[in-house]
Image (cartoon, rainbow, N blue to C red):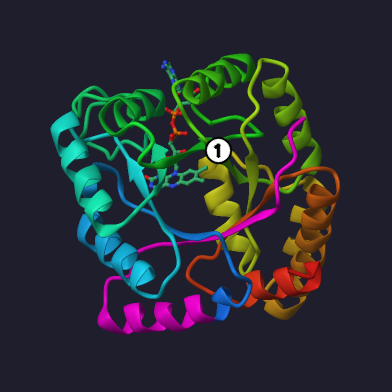
Amino acid sequence: MKTYAPKLSFEFFPTRTPEGRAKQVVTRKQLSQFRPDFFSCTSGAGGSTREGTLQTVQDILNEGTPAAPHLPCIGMDAGEIKELLQQYKQMGVRHLVALRGDIPSGIGSGMGGLRYANELVELVKNEFGNDFHIEVAAYPEYHPQSRSAEDDINHFVRKVKAGADSAITQYFYNADAYFRFVDDVQGRGVDIPIVPGIMPVASFSKLARFSDACGAEIPRWLRLKLQSYADDTAAIKALALDVVTEMCARLLREGAPGLHFYTLNQAGLSSTICQRLGY
Ligand code: FAD
């Protein structure tokens, strides 16, 4: 198994208002103290947040941190994707998160030309060679639409073999699922870094809704315990901080190549976890 210097990155989503944009600058400044390898910015499938993502990426670059735009390919044709990649390249972007994206209702899965992330990775490699470091998504608890665990692993391996340089996982609260996934794909010749995606918990109800949709499991004991705190957000945050920090510490101790935080545009919880971990 190869070893890597632990990586650190933080994810944002584009804001809609000038106030949101200004607040995000402050949030990133707080998180910059941990010297992240990059800040990433999500993007809506079908180009739905295109301007906001471009603006956020430009802001990040202006602040002097490498930026990694997320690029969901569904709902875009190859020409549009190439144009966008060219624009990113000219801006100075060297890092991408290549995704399929979630199909917006009303859009057929074949409409945009590309159907799966492996096809996007191939397109980036064919058209741009090594101009971009390509991240792909990994699902230690398996993608909710996959036909089987085995099928999902095969598709992940195919995406890596198409030229992905590293991967970021969907969030999880069960480190064993992550280690099992890494073992399984390494057994099939994958040796790129697979960085755990970390979701700090601010609100139980929102997390529960989101987790059901994306197929991430909240372990029963944690779900029940968080539920029992009802509206006591301080208690929810305190328990979740302990649980997530302990999981991060174990992940790093046992060989995870770094951490990627889903910040939800907030610095507080991610900062506390990084501080506790000694970043
Ligand atoms: P794929 O790797 O294409 O997989 C999608 C599904 O199809 C899986 O079930 C897989 O098993 C199956 N599959 C894959 N290849 C094939 C094939 N060749 N033939 C048949 N089946 C196949 N979404 C956004 O819209 N915007 C974002 O900014 C965004 N950022 C994300 C960041 C991270 C780190 C992660 C983990 C997810 C992100 N998502 C984002 C969500 C992601 O787009 C969804 O989970 C989406 O449903 C799958 O994207 P993917 O790139 O993993 O797809």
In front here: 210 or 228? Answer: 210
Please provide percent x and percent y for residue 45: 29, 44
Please provide percent x and percent y for residue 70: 38, 48
User: Residue 216's quadrant in the figure?
Assistant: top right
Q: Residue at x 71, y 29 (%)?
A: 181
User: Residue 30's quadrant in the figure?
Assistant: bottom right
Q: Residue at x 59, y 42 (%)?
A: 169
Q: Amino acid at mark 1?
A: Ser
- Left or right relative to 167: residue 122: left
- Residue 28 counted in the magenta span: yes
Residue 141's place in the image compared with 66, above or below, is above
**Residue range of the region highlighted in magenta in the rendering:** 1-29
Q: Secondary structure at mark 1?
A: strand
Spot the residue most to the front.
130
The residue under label 1 is 166
In front here: 240 or 221? Answer: 240
User: Residue 233's quadrant in the figure?
Assistant: bottom right
In front here: 165 or 202? Answer: 165
Please provide percent x and percent y for residue 198: 64, 55
Residue 27's place in the image compared with 149, above or below, is below
- Left or right relative to 110: residue 199: right
Q: Report the quarter where the C terminus lies.
A: bottom right
Task: Please tell me in which quarter of the rendered image ligand 1 is found.
Answer: top left
| Callout 1: CB less than 8 Å from ligand 1 | no
